[in-house]
Image (cartoon, coloured by chain):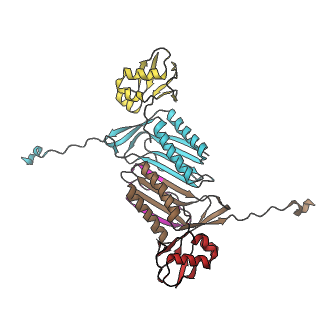
Chain colours: A cyan, B brown, C red, D yellow
Amino acid sequence: MSVSVTITDGPLGPFLPPGAPAGAGALVLFEGIVREREADGPIDALDYEAYQPMAQRMLARIGDDLTTRLGLLGLWVEHSRGRVGVGRCSFRLVIAAPHRKEALAAMDEFIDRLKQDVPIWKVPVWRRATVAPARPSDRPDAG
Amino acid sequence: MSVSVTITDGPLGPFLPPGAPAGAGALVLFEGIVREREADGPIDALDYEAYQPMAQRMLARIGDDLTTRLGLLGLWVEHSRGRVGVGRCSFRLVIAAPHRKEALAAMDEFIDRLKQDVPIWKVPVWRRATVAPARPSDRPDAG
Amino acid sequence: MSVKVLLFGAARLTVGREHVVVDAGQAPTCRAVLTELGAAYPALRPIAGVGRLAVNSEFASGDQQVRSTDEVALIGLVSGG
Amino acid sequence: MSVKVLLFGAARLTVGREHVVVDAGQAPTCRAVLTELGAAYPALRPIAGVGRLAVNSEFASGDQQVRSTDEVALIGLVSGG
């Protein structure tokens, strides 16, 4: 049983599969990817602010709690801090467990608790306004 | 939107992350790993039999159905055929979707339907009996 | 009509063969094939009792008629994953 | 007593500062600090209204007293993931 928590500056690197611990029958992975829209409009990136060391400690506490309660065999979590562009990964959770059922339950509960209790905030970087196309009447050849 | 189905001889190779499709906010992965016990005792491996091409077709049909119904952006599934040793991966499902909710719902339903309707069977390869230790009375120096 | 039925998994292990041939009468339905399978191979009764045949790689209802050119497989309970 | 309150996310953006200092009276509780935050910075009221302060990196109840050596942060609603 192991719980690993990493806060990384910028987007997360590629997933490096942990070796499946002895007794594992299920390995699940979740990656959160920055989408090109937030509620209020298109964005270029998200800036993540983390209140440290509380964020790290809360992530570890949730991981420890789920590991003990559900009998997980390994839990690895990574979260970005700072700017993460559209299409890049900002959050990754990997869980190994004896069976699918507890692995998926743990994943669902972990993400719910992350979004409820872990002091990390995203701040949208709104998409830079593209230069408005010139109106026809502005064109030299439009008169 | 893409659905990819692969039946592989022997254990699956390492996970090669697909590029997240445009618009994806969540990428989830499930790996099934052969455990060292089946209900009736310890095993060395599982032999998977697949009725082809029905197995491949059913996997693709489930993937297509979920993709359409839940608006998935990509679904990749791999399943082993033949012998897979303890600790090795026999099944992998990767789903990309706009949000976590539909990605996890699709993963859960896909695996339920796999276990219900896809003509693939596992046959345990029971652990070879280890040589029983000699009884003390058999030892030359025990008399 | 003789019907060749493909076996897999526990069914194949139980019978020790990759297929069996049963005579399920004239123009048999899938239901008749399953019944005859259980009669000819009592060890297959629990699996045949699940009631799932595939005909030409599609699940077939009990009423579906089996033709002599069809590929028939006993599916029973599967256990992939 | 002056209490320095760290700000993050929308709270930081709204006020344009990484922390603010409020005077919440003698031996203030967390509840008093939140009330004073909303009074001094009306733009923070929706966030302070969520009622979550962290004291020394742990969530604190409304009744918890804030000491002059404590590190206090306004958590409000988080949005990681």
Q: Position of residue A100 (x, y in %)?
A: 55, 54
Q: Position of residue C49 (x, y in %)?
A: 57, 70
Q: Residue at x 40, y 22 (%)?
A: D37
Q: Is residue B13 magenta?
A: yes
Judged by its main secondary structure, the magenta piece is loop
Toward the viewer: D75 or B114? B114
Compared to residue B34, the image places residue C7 above or below, namely: below
Compared to residue A132, the image places residue D19 above or below, namely: above
Residue located farthest toward the right when viewing the structure as drawn: B143
Toward the viewer: A92 or B102? B102
Q: Position of residue A84 (x, y in %)?
A: 40, 42
Q: How many marks?
A: 0
Q: Quadrant of residue D47?
A: top left
Residue located farthest toward the left when viewing the structure as drawn: A143
Q: Quadrant of residue B18?
A: bottom left
In the shown orientation, is residue B29 left or right of residue A83? right
Can residue A8 be seen here? The reply is: no
Stretch of the chain drawn in magenta: B1-28
Q: Residue at x 83, y 62 (%)?
A: B134
Q: Is residue D78 magenta?
A: no
Compared to residue D58, the image places residue A129 above or below, namely: below
Can residue C73 be seen here? The reply is: yes
In the shown orientation, is residue C31 left or right of residue B21? right
Q: Residue at x 47, y 34 (%)?
A: A119
Q: Residue at x 69, y 63 (%)?
A: B127
Q: Position of residue A28 (x, y in %)?
A: 52, 52
Residue located farthest toward the top when viewing the structure as drawn: D26
